[in-house]
Every structure is written in structure tokens, then in C-alpha cells.
Amino acid sequence: MSLAARIHNLITRTKGLNDIHDDLATVDTVVDAIKAKTDNLPSDPADQSAIEAKIEEMEGGGFATGTDTLEKIRDELTVIEGSGFATGTDTLEKIADAIAAIQSPLSAKERSLLGAGAFKGFQDYFGDAGTANGVKSAYWTEVTNGASPGTITIKNSESSLPVYVELYSGADSGDDAIIHTTTKYLISPYESDITTVHLKLRMKVNKVSDTDSVYFGMGLADGETPAQYALIRKAGNTSFMFRTKNSTSTEDTSLSLSANTWYTFEIRWTTSDCKLYQDDSLVATHTTYIPTVPLGVWARTEASSTDGYLYLVWVQLWAE
């Protein structure tokens, strides 16, 4: 081989070695980059399985690892830790279940009585007032009329009941005692976000066949005569009845009550009817003459030729 040919071959080989050297340098750079990315990856399949288990745990706890960043998950865990959960020992699924239980929806009645619903209802067990005279002014207004006005008294003289309120009519004709919420709590099913108004109470009367009068339920009045109402009533010598009244007329259903017997009544009022439950049994449904304006709780005893008593243990007013 000529000298020229040998020199040409040597140059060609040298160029090839340089190219290989450059390629190896590139590979080294790539390997270093890959190593930097993979240093924290599991060293064996067992570690990989542990990571996958943790991811499944996160998904079960309500985190979507495909969309929730680790930073977001970290922040959520911080909140959870502050709520008394130990994320080191409590699984995310367990924590999620506990939070869901805590945040389970309250009933419409519970929301209303807690002041969180469409209507801020109230319940009064009267015992908060101790044995002093009078009812809580936050809920009630007291009215007494007549020559010898009636009385409104908190009592605890019955062994089976801790406390109750006694409305005594007074002894002379025209005397009476009234409690109402007309100036403090008015409610109507015609208001937005309300479909049904409920009034539930525990009561008894001392007699059912005398000339005194007794009224309790829902009415629109700050005195003796409601303009519209849904009431359990006994006017003079008449028997007890459930009466509803709108601006036009009244509708009645007779009731059977015994003297000195405790009853639980509930009035359910919607835009289409008024229903009365006595000890959880439906006893009346009125659909014709039902109230069309907001009403409050209203109770009254009135003397005629005889006196009378109305006793209330508790009252609940709420909406749903």
C-alpha cells in the first residue's frame, strides 16, 4: 500500500475514534441526568408497591393524585393534623370518613332550631326561667286583661314534670292571660325557601266542659283576637276543636280531649293545607280556609263565669 493510502486510512480511523469519544461523552451526560431523576425512586419492586399503596390510600381519602398537586395534599394534611388527626397513624380514608360524618347534613328542623335554616326557629322548655314568674322575653310577650287580670307563672309543682308555664285566666268575666310571639317570631309557608311551618307543643287544661275559654296554636295578634289563625280552641261551653281562619271564613274539626291529661299537638301549615297531629296521629286536615299571612305562637285563657288554666311544658317552632 502506498504511503498516501496508509496516511488516509490512519486519518479516517482517528476521526472515527474522536466521534465515538464525543458520543460517549453525550451518553455520560444523559446517564448523569437520568441518575439525578431516579435517585429517589424505589430500589426494588417492593418499594414500588409501597408507593402504589400510598397513592391508592390518597385516592381513597378524597385526593386525586392525577389532578391534586403534592403541595395541595400537603396543605390539606396540615389542616387535618390541626383538626386532631394524626396522619402518621390515621389513614387518609379513615380521616375522610370521620370528616364526612362530622359534616353530615343536619335535618331541616335542626337547622331551623339552630338558626341556620331559612327561618330561625326556637324551642322553649320554660325551665331556663327557674321558678320565677314569667316567660322568656326573648321569645314571648305577656298580656293580661280584666278587673282581676290573669297570671302567667313558671311552676314545678308536678313530680313528673320539672317545669311548666301556667296561664291562669283570672276569676272574673273578661279576665285573661295571653302569651304570644307576634312581635318577635312570625313565620309563613309563603316565604321563599319555606314549604312547611311546624308548631309542636306539650299541654293540658284543667277542664274541658265549662264556660272558660282556652286557645293555643298559631295566630296573628298582639292582644285578644287574632285576625287569622290555626288554633286548638274551646270557646265558652263549646267543645274543643281545631279551627283555621283566613281573611274570609273559618273551618272546624272537633277534638276529643280530657281534663288534666297531657297531650302533644303539632300543627303543620303549608300553602295548600293545615294539618293537626294529636300525639303523633293525624286528626284534622283543613284545605279551604287556611291562613295566608305570617303567624306567631299564641296562647290564651279567658274567664267567663268560671276561671280556667292552660299548662305548657315546651314549645317548638320551626320551618323546612
Image (cartoon, helix red, strand yellow):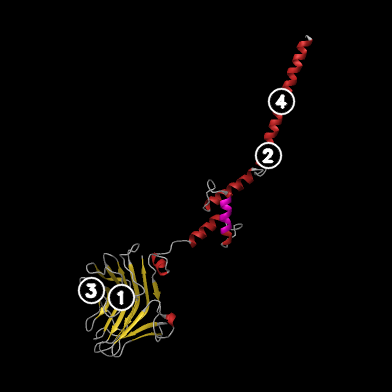
Residue that numbered label 4 is attached to: 20
Check disc 4 and report its element: helix, strand or loop. helix
Q: Residue furthest right?
A: 3
Q: CA distance from mark 2 to mark 3?
A: 88 Å
Q: CA distance from mark 1 to mark 4?
A: 100 Å
Residue that numbered label 3 is attached to: 253
Query: Of the residues under marks 4 and 3, which one precedes in the sequence?
Result: 4
Q: Where residue 251 appears, x then y in whole percent?
A: 21, 72
Q: Residues within 10 Å of mark 2 (few under 14, many from 20)?
A: few
* Residue 261 in view in this figure: no
Check disc 2 and report its element: helix, strand or loop. helix
Q: Quadrant of the N terminus?
A: top right
Q: Residue furthest left?
A: 249
Check disc 1 and report its element: helix, strand or loop. strand
In the figure, is residue 117 to the left or right of 90? left
Query: Which numbered marker is on residue 35?
Result: 2
Viewer-nearest of discs 3 and 1: 1
In the figure, is residue 172 to the left or right of 10? left
